[in-house]
Image (cartoon, rainbow, N blue to C red):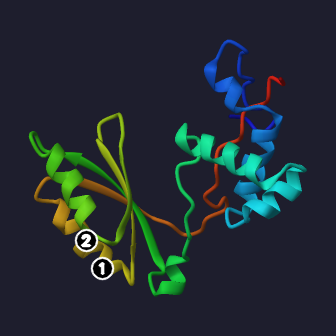
Amino acid sequence: MPKNRRPPRLDSYDPAARLFDEVNLQLLSELQGDPRLSMAELARRVAMSAPAVTERVQRLERAGVIKAYRMETDPAALGLPVTAFARIRPMPGSLPKIAELAAEIPWVTECYRITGEDCFLVKLHAHAIDEIEEILDRFLAYGNTTTSIVVSTPVDRRNPPLPESQGP
């Protein structure tokens, strides 16, 4: 979405619109800023009672809007300064094997099934480039790889923009 465009507004007939009233959007915004907020602090920030905020947050969790609360680590600080993305084009019949292998390799931190000539995109971290080669060699039994080494991250991982509220 271009920089100057806003997220789409939810139509009032959309059942999700009830989830995204002003209060819930404010709760989501606060939690995106600091997922470790206590319910009491979150309640203070939105001027509501802690039980009411807890109920709203639980409703957002049950609806799948809030998927998880996570800790994020810096791979370089863990001794894994090399990050790479690899596109994988599987040989016939190898699709499930590539997904299984990606799940088994701890240095693969993300794996996406994608469209186009390549069917998978994996993100991996390593101590050095030669270790990237060793990891990729494991995939070569099931398909061809095309790899790009990350040189910088100008935009850190972030959540998508929140929808606009339709009001009450």
Residue 18: image location, x then y, percent: 70, 26
In this rendered view, identify the residue nearer to me: 141 or 35. Answer: 35
Q: Residue 116 bears which disc, if any? A: none
Residue in view at x 36 percent, y 39 percent: 114
In the picture, which quadrant includes the N terminus?
Answer: top right
Q: Is residue 111 left or right of residue 64?
A: left
Q: Amino acid at mark 2?
A: Ile
Q: Splitting the image into 4 quarters, where does residue 148 fall?
A: bottom left
**Relative height, residue 135 to residue 8 (above, below):** below
In this rendered view, identify the residue nearer to me: 167 or 105. Answer: 167
Q: Is residue 92 left or right of residue 107?
A: left
Q: Does the CB distance between marks 2 and 1 fall below 8 Å?
A: yes
In the picture, which quadrant includes the C terminus?
Answer: top right
Residue 118: image location, x then y, percent: 30, 42
Question: Mark 2, residues whose alpha carbon is within 10 Å: few (<14), some, or many (≥20)?
Answer: some
Q: Is residue 133 left or right of residue 67?
A: left
Residue 131: image location, x then y, percent: 30, 79
Q: Residue 131 bears which disc, if any? A: 1
Q: Tag 2's secondary structure?
A: helix
Q: Amino acid at mark 1?
A: Glu
What is the C-alpha distance between the residues marked 2 and 1?
6 Å
Question: Mark 1, residues whose alpha carbon is within 10 Å: few (<14), some, or many (≥20)?
Answer: some
Q: Residue 135 bears which disc, if any? A: 2
**Relative height, residue 79 to residue 99 (above, below):** below
Q: Splitting the image into 4 quarters, where does residue 13 fall?
A: top right
Residue in view at x 30 percent, y 80 percent: 130
**Relative height, residue 125 to residue 63 (above, below):** below
Residue in view at x 64 percent, y 50 percent: 159
